[in-house]
């Protein structure tokens, strides 16, 4: 590749990153405003939060191209805190939330996101796609000036809204087939905005939701008493926000990893998210995390580096400081069309085709995780429920695999060759394999093709040897690991362990400890 070609490629990449970042900045405005209103705080708090969190994570985070900001997942957690104790307690809770996340990143606990099964990932992504779609439906409602009640649009206003939403979606879908020189999302927003503004068409705009004009965010110490009573109030909220934020961020990181075929750094992202939220709390922010919708917009528009995230965050601040009058004229129809396309792109349509090809449990997990995400908007509960169900299903399947092949050698010694893992779920089946009363005087239990996995398994071994000892019979345990033999020291009076061909492996309980 020549120097000129290399320079042109870098120039194109930089242009793509900047334009992608500007697209993200436009899409962040209504989201930040909406999430602020959900939390019961000023729209500027959400906008400042999106700027601070987006900038810090773009520079220091573990996933270039991923966009962070104020999110609905965090907003729904703090509604009760703001309503009960006021916004100052929210700022304090956000600071503590960030410290918890930084601690998780420092302890390198972000790697445990790998324990989330793929079925849970599918459920998470599909649930968020539905949530993103449903969140846009409010733009098709109008409030009655007298009663304040909301009702669905009808007549001409509805057709105008639908028409421009579909136009936006069509541009986003078809323009990349003609050219990829500029992000289709940005072209769609600009084109639809110009048509509506210059044609003088009366339809809802960003300014109809709230004014976004303001100054620079200022440093602000939360005005709360520094005592244990305050800590008792904010800690439950901070902990939930920290976990929800990291779960959503790390799962979004995995989604972007798959889209870009690269790998992010979960622990670095955890620490960056924590630092961003701590600083956000000290500047009067509501906290946040990674945003899957905006991240997909960015990546789909060509944003791959930290530049697009930085441009998105700085662009948002520029809108607040200098361009509020222009941004407030952007029609909501264009932004709704953009988010509809994000929802369609986010949904894992392949998951609908594989439900007959995967275990029934996996399909049930996908439905449950998606359902909890949609109904309760609580990602932490959804993911934890999915992981627990998957873990129990895995334990049940492995519990059924325990079996024993029985034989008697020329010396009259009965051999039990154990197959399958011995753990808490399979100990009952293991105990049923033995015929204590009718067995000969000497028994060999061989674990060459089995694995003693936890303390429940050790207890099961102890009990079976005790049963044989009570009737005066001798048990030899063969091919046990060194770790297992150490745990069996307390039963050494009745257990004889054969040391031949003992494999070396660690107990699961020790490895996790």
Image: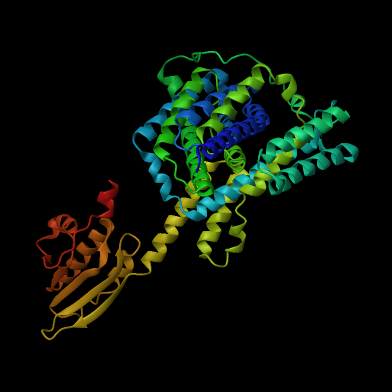
Nearest the viewer among 154 and 257 is 257
Q: Is residue 175 above or below residue 485?
A: above
Nearest the viewer among 105 and 299 is 299
Using the rendered image of the protein, determine whether residue 86 is visible from the camera's viewpoint: no
Image coords of residue 85 (percent x, y): 55, 21
Q: Is residue 473 above or below residue 350?
A: below
Horizontal side, residue 97 vs residue 44: left or right: left
Residue 194, quarter of the rendered image: top right
Image coords of residue 463 (percent x, y): 22, 64
Q: Residue at x 64, y 48 (%)?
A: 345
Horizontal side, residue 51 vs residue 266: left or right: right
Q: Residue at x 38, y 69 (%)?
A: 400
Q: Residue at x 37, y 40 (%)?
A: 109
Image coords of residue 372 (percent x, y): 58, 47
Nearest the viewer among 432 and 234 is 234
Image coords of residue 446 (percent x, y): 20, 71
């Amino acid at each position: 590749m020549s120097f000129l070609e290399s320079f042109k490629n870098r120039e194109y990449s930089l242009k793509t990153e900047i334009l992608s970042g500007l697209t993200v900045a436009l899409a962040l405005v209504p989201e930040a405003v909406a999430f602020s209103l959900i939390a019961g705080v000023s729209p500027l708090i959400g906008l400042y939060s999106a700027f601070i969190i987006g900038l810090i994570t773009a520079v220091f985070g573990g996933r270039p191209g991923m966009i962070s900001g104020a999110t609905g997942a965090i907003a729904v957690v703090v509604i009760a805190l703001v309503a009960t104790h006021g916004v100052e307690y929210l700022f304090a809770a956000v600071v503590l939330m960030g410290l918890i996340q930084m601690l998780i990143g420092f302890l390198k606990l972000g790697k445990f996101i790998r324990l989330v099964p793929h079925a849970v990932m599918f459920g998470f992504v599909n649930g968020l796609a539905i949530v993103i779609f449903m969140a846009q439906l409010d733009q098709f409602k109008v409030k009655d000036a007298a009663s304040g009640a909301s009702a669905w649009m009808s007549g001409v206003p509805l057709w105008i809204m639908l028409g421009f939403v579909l136009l936006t979606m069509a541009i986003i879908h078809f323009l990349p087939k003609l050219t990829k020189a500029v992000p289709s999302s940005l072209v769609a927003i600009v084109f639809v905005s110009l048509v509506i503004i210059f044609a003088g068409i009366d339809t809802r705009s960003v300014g109809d939701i709230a004014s976004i004009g303001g100054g620079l965010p200022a440093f602000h110490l939360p005005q709360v008493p520094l005592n244990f009573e305050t800590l008792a109030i904010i800690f439950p909220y901070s902990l939930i926000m920290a976990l929800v934020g990291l779960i959503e961020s790390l799962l979004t990181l995995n989604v972007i990893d798959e889209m870009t075929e690269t790998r992010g750094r979960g622990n670095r992202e955890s620490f960056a998210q924590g630092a961003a939220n701590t600083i956000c709390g000290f500047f009067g922010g509501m906290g946040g995390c990674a945003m899957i919708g905006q991240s997909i917009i960015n990546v789909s528009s060509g944003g791959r580096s930290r530049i697009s995230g930085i441009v998105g965050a700085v662009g948002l601040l520029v809108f607040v400081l200098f361009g509020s009058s222009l941004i407030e004229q952007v029609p909501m129809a264009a932004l709704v069309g953009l988010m509809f396309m994000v929802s369609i792109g986010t949904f894992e349509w392949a998951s609908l085709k594989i439900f007959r090809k995967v275990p029934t449990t996996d399909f049930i997990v996908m439905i449950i995780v998606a359902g909890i995400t949609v109904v309760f908007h609580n990602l932490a509960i959804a993911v934890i429920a999915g992981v627990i169900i998957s873990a129990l299903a895995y334990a049940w399947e492995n519990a059924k695999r325990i079996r024993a092949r029985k034989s008697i050698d020329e010396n009259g010694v009965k051999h039990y060759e154990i197959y399958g893992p011995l753990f808490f779920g399979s100990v009952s089946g293991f105990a049923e394999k033995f015929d204590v009363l009718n067995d000969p005087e000497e028994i060999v239990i061989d674990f060459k093709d089995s694995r003693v996995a936890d303390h429940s398994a050790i207890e099961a071994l102890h009990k079976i040897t005790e049963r044989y000892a009570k009737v005066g019979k001798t048990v030899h345990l063969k091919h046990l690991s060194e770790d297992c033999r150490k745990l069996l020291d307390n039963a050494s009076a009745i257990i004889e362990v054969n040391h031949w061909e003992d494999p070396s492996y660690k107990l699961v309980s020790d490895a996790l400890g």
